[in-house]
Structure formats: structure tokens, C-alpha cells
Image (spheres, helix red, strand yellow):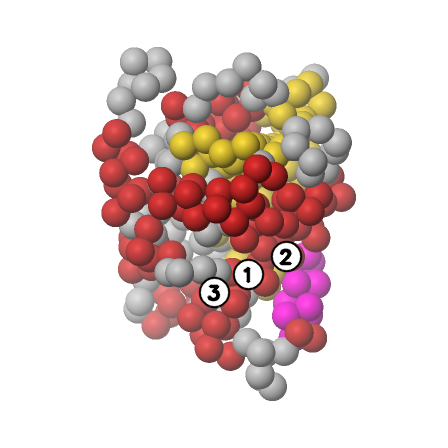
Amino acid sequence: MANGQDFSEEKDRLRDVIDSYGEGAAPFDAAMRIFMMRTLEPYFGEGPCLQVGCAHGEQTGLLLERFNELTVIEPTSEFLNHTRDKYSDRATFVHALIEDFETDKQFETIIFSHVLEHVIDPIGVITKLGELLTPTGRLYILVPNAEAPSRRIAVKMGILSHLEALSADDIAAGHRRVYRQDTLLRDVLGAQLTAIDTGGIMFKPLANFQFNALMGGDLINDAFMEGCYQLGRETPASCASIYVVAGKKS
């Protein structure tokens, strides 16, 4: 409990949606995590890192390759225990929502990847994460992109009523909203942080399930994935994920 608030219902809600994440990373999600690291690593500084939400721990493993001091917070005990079993004492694991996470520590790097779309109060959560940064620290926020071509196609097909509508997969995963670049920036600036950079990761012409079915064969090989990544750097509004690198105001 933090500031007198009880988040037990939110923890129960998140526990109810973990089955939508399957047993491990699907091929497209696994590739995306590597592309995310390629995009953000040039901004990383030295010092403690905080990962907010770990799921099955694939991103945790990538962060442990880069950071000597990693703290992982995760509200779902199933995900936390699974990831802790994989990496043992290489990281500090805390069973908590970001809303009720309490620490005196500050972090040079905070990874907040595909979590903001789940939370009740996005500006409040970003504000709290900003308070956990060192003066030179960076907060890396990544979210699914409402404007991805795969979603635009879904609107034309009548599967989605509009670009920011929640899909069946969004609902199953417990998402509360879908962001565009401007609405993501709105919430970052509303939390009184400075946006150092913003962009997109991975041009996305297909839905996740279509990528997963075709990856590894002749139709979607490594060269095609690299091409989508490079094109996405030029056209962030057409990417699978969008991001903001944020810091404290000077």
C-alpha cells in the first residue's frame, strides 16, 4: 500500500491476464526486444538499472548483459518467480507494482517497456519513475503503436473501429489504452519530464501472429527483419512500438 492506496484489485487483474502471454517469447516479440536494445543502448549510462515488469525474463537477460546492477520489479508472482529462477542472484527481484514500489535508491536507467498501456494513472506512474531517476538518469518508455500499418489494415477490414480502439489481443493482455507518438509525448510532458528523444522500432506491415507464422522461412528472413527495422527508424509512425527517452528537467 502506498499513499493510503490499496492496489490488490490491480494485482488480481494482472494475474488474470498472464495466460495471454503464453509460455515464453513468441518469435516476433523476441526479435523486437533485440531491436529495442539496439535502438536504446546508445543512450545508456553507467550505474544502477531498474526494469519495470519482466514477464518471462527475456528482456531481463538482455539487460544483464549490459548492466552490472539490475533491480527488477514485477507484480505477478508467477512471472517474478520464473525470472528469478532463471537468473538467480544476478539481479534484485521485488514483488510489487510500480505504484506501491518503495525505495530510497535512484537509478541511472529505468526500462519501462510495454507497461504504460496497462496502468490506471499513466501520468502519475511516469511522475513516480521520474522521481526514481538520478539527476543524469534516463527513463525509457516503450509502448505499442496505435498507428502501425497492421492496425490501419485492421481498421479497413472492420476488425477495429478506429486506430485507438482496443483489439481482442489488447483486451486479453489487460491493456487500457493504445498510444500514438503525440499522446505518449503528452503524458511524458504532463509528468514534468523532458523528452530527449522519441521514435519508433520496427516497421510493421503485418500483425504479430502473421509475423510469428512466417518468420524463419523464405518469406520473412533475417534480411527482411533488418529491412523493417531500418525503415522503421525513418518512419516511426509506422512502427510496431514507439518510444520516448526522458529525463529530469534541468
Depth check: 153 or 39 in front? 39
Q: Which residue is at a point 43% across and 37% down the rendered structure image?
A: 74
Q: Is residue 142 left or right of residue 100?
A: right
Depicted 73 relative to depicted 37: above or below: above
Which residue is identified by label 1?
Answer: 30
State whether residue 19 appears in this view. Answer: yes
User: Contact (CB < 8 A) between labels 2 and 3?
Assistant: no
Helix or strand or loop: what does disc 1 sit on? helix
Helix or strand or loop: what does disc 3 sit on? loop
User: Contact (CB < 8 A) between labels 3 and 1?
Assistant: yes
| Coordinates of residue 50 in the picture (x, y in percent) | 57, 32
Which residue is identified by label 3?
Answer: 26
- Amino acid marked by disc 3: Ala
User: Contact (CB < 8 A) between labels 1 and 2?
Assistant: yes
- Amino acid marked by disc 1: Ala
Depth check: 132 or 71 in front? 71
